[in-house]
Image: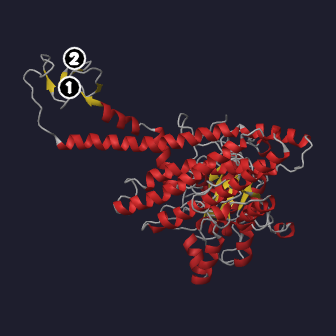
Amino acid sequence: MDDYFSAEEGDCYYSSDQESLDGIDNEESELHPVSSKKSNTQVITQESLLAAQREDLLRVMDLLSIKEHHARTLLIHYQWDVEKLFAVFVEKGKDSLFSGAGVTVFDCQYGNSSFSRSSQMSCDVCIEDVPGDQMTRMDCGHCYCNNCWTEHFTVQINEGQSKRIRCMAHQCNAICDEDIVRNLVSKKRPDLAEKFDRFLLESYIEDNKMVKWCPSTPHCGNAIRAEDDKLCEVECSCGLQFCFSCLCQAHSPCSCLMWELWRKKCRDESETINWITVHTKLCPKCYKPVEKNGGCNLVRCICGQCFCWLCGGATGSDHTYRSIAGHSCGRYQDDKEKQMERAKRDLDRYTHYHHRYKAHTDSSKLEDKLRDTIHEKVSKSEKRELKLKDFSWVTNGLDRLFRSRRVLSYSYAFAYYMFGEELFKDEMTPEEREMKKNLFEDQQQQLESNVEKLSQLLEEPFDEFSDDKVMAIRIQIINLSVAVDTLCKKMYECIENDLLGSLQLGIHNISPYRSKGIEQAAQFYASWNSKGADKFIPLDSGTSGVTSRPEQASGSRSSEDTICSSSQKRPKKEGSFLNNKVTLLDLNLPADFIDPN
């Protein structure tokens, strides 16, 4: 145990059972005071989506004393940020709040929106006289026939503008009453009326910065709402763990931009191009890359063109081992040599970080199989007559191993961009970059060393050990678990304070480290009671509680993705990002594919 820490051994080493247990409990409690603390993230299912939307609608309706469609128009305009809406109301007043969102409210100025059948009125759009009961007036005062309104609404819904359909009068920015839209469209196109209701319901997710669809494939039908911190990693009730900011798999300590660049670099042909630059030369005739497979510097392309390997210039075929007839290239070409050296250096640097990233990725997949083995060993140990009856320290150590292995793997992708010239070339001097690189790598190596020791100890056949040996390995695993957790926290502190915190451009932020792993989102429960909800007419019954995936869901989901019913939640599979069992990006698979094995 002397080499768990090179510098901070005294802080994390425990010599007895009780000290070990106290130590790991203290580590957990620092970040998680009590389990009853309200979760910062919530799962919004298909059934609770209407309730979640209603909760915000009722707050605005009660405060401003307005109708439901006016409240929804305001919330869509302010991206469902109720606090921002209230702030504008307090600072600028009700008139400014309404005009900015296109809400027009007249207190009984125009009376009812419909007229008596006996009266004849002229529609200014189709220029026809129609009975009064076939005319409809909006809140803004503009009045047209129902056929013209219906055609206008149909076009807007088909064009995807159904969440904020404006009045068709020239230069009128008022938003049409959604009840009128629904009633008129449903008479001729019931399917479009359902689509209209679905868009209104899903606007709570599509236009809301605090709510995003779970990016699971196939889609589980859930959305996640982040109450406070939008820069977080969360686990959906379907089991998928992902970054709430970019909707990619959980990737801290990489920032979202770093992870996107790393994924692209791993899947495209950028490094293949580097290899081609280093090991091949272009034919001066057909410009195809040619690889040299012999010792002679006269190379022949498959197109028949001969050229000099040293300079790439076209030549004839006559040559000796010493020279090529009519060709001389002994002069040094500085630019071309520098270009090749740089390409080779970049390739070697990428290979270094990629090799270690992939090594920890592969290790995490192999260690994922440890879970079943550990459960078997625990079952056998519990049946034996040992002094020790509680083996939770084994599963806790295994969970710590999964989390730290994930952090360690992504730390190499972070280091590739942090200490390269692609993102921070002008942010640090070469001396500062080297100093920070050494600081980070020292912590990275300490973490790597302790993670490997923890992995080795967990593979020990403790189910065959004697009492004394089981107690000894128990203390070792607990000590290593605490040490690994402390090193992870220190690495995150180093990244946030010493590395990213010192940069002028604050576009690179990372999700905070959590000792207990990625937070599982709690189920959403509406805070308003049924009595208050009964005051208002709910949305169309065909859409309450049931919604399908929009044509273009936020988070760059394709139009072909659809929502599965809530009763068909994606099962938790081994090998996915499920309950701290981490499977990292496999570079041999398609970009967005998560290996189910």
Label 2 with label 1: CB-CB less than 8 Å: yes
> Tag count in the figure?
2
Q: Position of residue 308 (x, y in %)?
A: 18, 26
**Residue at the image point whose x is 70% and y is 44% from the top:** 457
Mark drawn on residue 404: none
**Front-most of residues 330 and 423:** 330
Place of residue 277 in the rendered image (x, y in percent of width and height, measured from the top left): 31, 35
Which sits earlier in the primary sequence, circle 2 or circle 1?
1
Decide if residue 117 is in sight here.
no
Element under disc 2: loop
The amino acid sitting under disc 2 is Gly
Q: Which mark is residue 304?
A: 2
380 vs 312, left or right, is: right
Residue 279 in the image, given as x and y percentages of width and height: 31, 31
Above/below status of 514 relative to 307: below
Residue displayed at 84% across by 42% down: 466
Quadrant hosting residue 526: bottom right
Residue reaching furthest to the left? 326
User: Label 2, label 1: how many angstroms apart (C-alpha)?
Assistant: 9 Å
- The residue labelled by disc 1 is 285
In this orientation, which residue lies closer to the viewer: 389 or 50? 389
**Residue at 66% across / 65% down in the picture?**
11
210 lies above or below 554: below
Image color mode: secondary structure
What amino acid type should be assigned to the residue bearing mark 1?
Lys
* Corner quadrant of residue 124: bottom right
227, 563: nearer the viewer: 227
CA neighbours of label 1 inside 10 A, class few (<14), some (14 to 19), many (20+): some
SS state under label 1: loop
